[in-house]
Image (tube, rainbow, N blue to C red):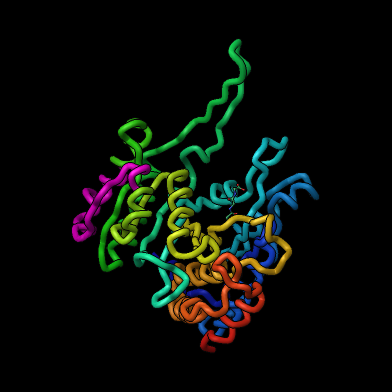
Amino acid sequence: RSMATSSRKSLTIGLIPADGIGREVIPAARDAIIAVKSELPELKFIDLLAGWETFTRTGTALPRETVQTLKEQCDCALFGSVSSPSRKVAGYSSPIVALRKELDLYANIRPVVSVQGSAVAQGPTVDLIVVRENTECLYVKDENLIQTENGKEARATRLITERASTRIGKIAFELAKARPRKLVTIIHKSNVLSVTDGLFRESVRAVPAVSGGKYDDVTIEEQLVDSAVYRLFREPQIFDVMVAPNLYGDIISDAAAALVGSLGVIPSINAGDDFVMGEPVHGSAPDIAGKGIANPVASIRSAALMLRHLGYTSAADKIDKAVNDTLAPAKLLTPDLRGTASTSQVTDHIMGLIEK
Ligand code: GGG
């Protein structure tokens, strides 16, 4: 599924650190890409604005210029993290949710993998990918609040379409096909939400039937979302590729992160047919922002995942190897992994290990 690399003479990467620790870890991801520049076409980085802080200064969380520059000048992008308020603020809307829609980045791909031989992750070996639908579900944010005679009443629309469920299903089957276990588990709750989750489940299930036998070697299973979380904690090794509607995928991937040590090591890409944006799964972590102790690994791995998606396999391999060789001895770790190292110490160590 990689976007063709052969015709690319240059690679222009939009950098959107956004809020909080995003500003501390996106520079580390940029440095990792620069460290493998011998594997890449001529690199250009463009700094772009988005986020809560941008909103408080300019009145918009996602300036038009950011979207236009991404569409017109960038081949791909890296997004950091955003500090959306948990109350309604007039004029504010989550920029990451908007960006995924604007660029039609319909697949959020989140690999959760134990580091081999590492003291970081205890317990069973985890090697799974959460494939999260990225444009629909409750994240269409169609909410309203009315006053009734019994008090306030809030409603939200949950959108599930056959089109979006089918295309995320195809991504899941493609990923599973390339993996040793070749297993897709559909996550849903169609015993309760038989219409919306039922459509998701049926649409994903229908993918192999119209693929001309392409996915005959892929096994399909399904799991109710609540029992999937239970089994994820009890026996994570049973999962390979988990495909889920937007909200369940968001929650499951954060939960899975706990099994491999920290949310601070989990990368993702937001992928569409024409664009890809790397993004650490963690948020803006206001409690540690500005302290220089954020884990840069999720962002550095997101850069590698983005390069891999674009077809720059050896560049991605070099970055991933340096990250794994840093984590495995468990000697230089940031506080989220119970270490005492700083963002820059971990970043410098990884850079030192990247084969030039
Ligand atoms: N990098 C992931 C991230 O920023 N997570 C926080 C998040 O998505 N918050 C929801 C939002 O701001 O819309």
Q: Is residue 44 visible?
A: no
Image spot of residue 277 (x, y percent): 54, 61
Q: Residue at x 55, y 52 (%)?
A: 103
For this rendering, which residue is in front, 169 or 42? 169
Q: Residue at x 65, y 61 (%)?
A: 22
Location of residue 284 (image quadrant): bottom right
Q: Is residue 351 left or right of residue 194?
A: right
Looking at the picture, does residue 343 appear above or below residue 219? below
Image spot of residue 136 (x, y percent): 47, 41
Looking at the picture, does residue 219 appear above or below residue 30? above
Q: Is residue 119 left or right of residue 202?
A: right
Which residue appears farthest toward the bottom when viewing the image? Answer: 356
Looking at the picture, does residue 119 appear above or below residue 96? below
For this rendering, which residue is in front, 263 or 84? 263
For this rendering, which residue is in front, 267 or 303? 267
Location of residue 348 (image quadrant): bottom right
Which residue appears farthest toward the right when viewing the image? Answer: 57
Report how many numbered discs are placed on residues in the image.
0
Image spot of residue 113 (x, y percent): 41, 67
- Identify the image quadrant of the N terminus: bottom left
Q: Is residue 283 left or right of residue 301?
A: right
In the rendered structure, which segment of residues is drawn in magenta?
203-228
